Amino acid sequence: FTAQGLDLNQFSTASNARDAVELVKALGYESFNIDSVSYGTRLAMTIMNNISGYEDAPQLRSVVLDSAFPPSVYLIRTIVRSDHDFLPQLLAECQADAACNEAYPNLSERLAALLDKVEEEPLTANGETVTIDDLVKELRPGGTRAAYVPRMIAELEMGVLDTYLALRDEEVGAGSAEAIPISAATEELDPNDPVQAFIIDTKALLDSNAAAEFGFYMTLVLMEEDPLAVLPEFIAETYTGETAEQMLQISETLTAEDFVNSPYVAELLAEAAAASDPEAQLVSMRENNAQGMAQLLYSSIHCIDDILNESFEDAVDSYNSLAFPQLTNLDKSRVFAERCQNWLVDPAPIEVKGPVTSDVPALILQGDYDQPTPIYMGQTAASELVNSTYVLIPQQNHGTWKNAESCVGQIATAFLQDPEAELDLSCLDARQPQWALPGDGDS
């Protein structure tokens, strides 16, 4: 690459940070805020650390670090923790809850013993077999699954599969920790179009997950030759009770002309027609490739910033310290450790792995069950930034701020409006797990 004028060393986080500030300065801004997610938080923290050394740099007013990945964190040794650290956090939350801890005491020790037992010999009951891979899969976070994990562990100790099967079959734990406001789910629809007004009104009858599912299936209905005839059949087959009755009542206001004249239906039909065109398919394929991970950039950054300053032995040491090693393996770490062989870059100076120093107001948003950037990364960022507010988001994986109307969205928006004001975090209380206790009739 260097022979063709492309120096991969230019893709370090330090170089990207300087370029980002130069862009802001070129646009004429006197001050700016940074909203960053995942690797973007590393770039943001590098800017925070270095901005005082940039000539005529605009003022950095505030920074949001969502799912933090600090420069001081090494990549190779943390990969094995990505599939692990959420579970000790989950068990600690159960222990901190009086009712959960009373129902399931010493849960960490009991889970370690259960994993060892199932790893040695799969559990068989009522015609079902649970292998170690099966068990690990159902220990993963997502939605409201966390609330059922302690009870599942306790039941499996006794050879009972009730909660395990309920989680596996998504009979429990499939809901969201927080409902997305209906206004956010329908904000792109035009209520002046009768067809879109029907979708808006119908979504208001459903929770956020059901509303999203309804919106998807409605796109299929609307592309039928006679959607007015298909719609009642779809409602009758998919919904029951009062919800179905209300949907049918709302749909009775629609006419065939509404579907013919709907710009929303016309757009769906045009997209479907374009998708069947070979040239359009090629364009779509190119767009998808462009939107995927930029492997050259990805490898260059991580080789420069991390991997060339690490070794596979670092991952082994990290693995050996895990409470539940069955949750992860070393293969991914080995692949990453070998990623930079023959990659034409030099390791960054070891100083870039030092802690960040900055007094810029920072909001650190950390999902308590985050896998790509485990909880200790957010804690590390908080320990390094003297003017930071650390917010742990219950029942949340990677990427916490996805909607302005959500609880996290309200917190982040308030911070950006006044970075020095005390934040109201009370909306997080409703996101706490509602632990499933023995005898609860929900499985």
Image: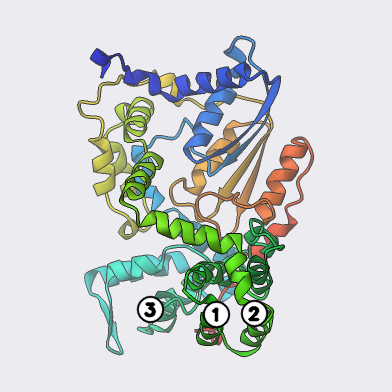
Residue type beneath disc 1: Leu
Marks 3 and 1: CB-CB under 8 Å? no
Query: Counting residues from the N terminus, which is met first, the one under dot 1 or under dot 2?
Result: 1
Marks 1 and 2: CB-CB under 8 Å? yes
Farthest top residue in view: 55
The image quarter containing residue 388 is: top right
Vertical side of 185 occupied by 98: above or below: below
Vertical side of 353 occupied by 117: above or below: below
- Residue 182 at x, y percent in the picture: 67, 64
Foreground of the two, 122 or 207: 207
Residue to which mark 3 is pinned: 157
Residue to which mark 1 is pinned: 231
Numbered tag placed on residue 251 in the rendering: 2
Residue type beneath disc 3: Glu
Density class for disc 1 (Cα within 10 Å; few <14, some 14-19, many ≥20) is some
Query: In terms of secondary structure, where does tag 1 sit?
Result: helix
440 left or right of 293? right
For marks 3 and 1, give the one nearer the viewer.
Answer: 1
Q: CA distance from mark 3 to mark 1?
A: 48 Å
Query: Counting residues from the N terminus, which is met first, the one under dot 2 or under dot 3?
Result: 3
Question: Can residue 140 be seen in the rendering of this structure?
Answer: yes
- Residue 122 at x, y percent in the picture: 25, 75
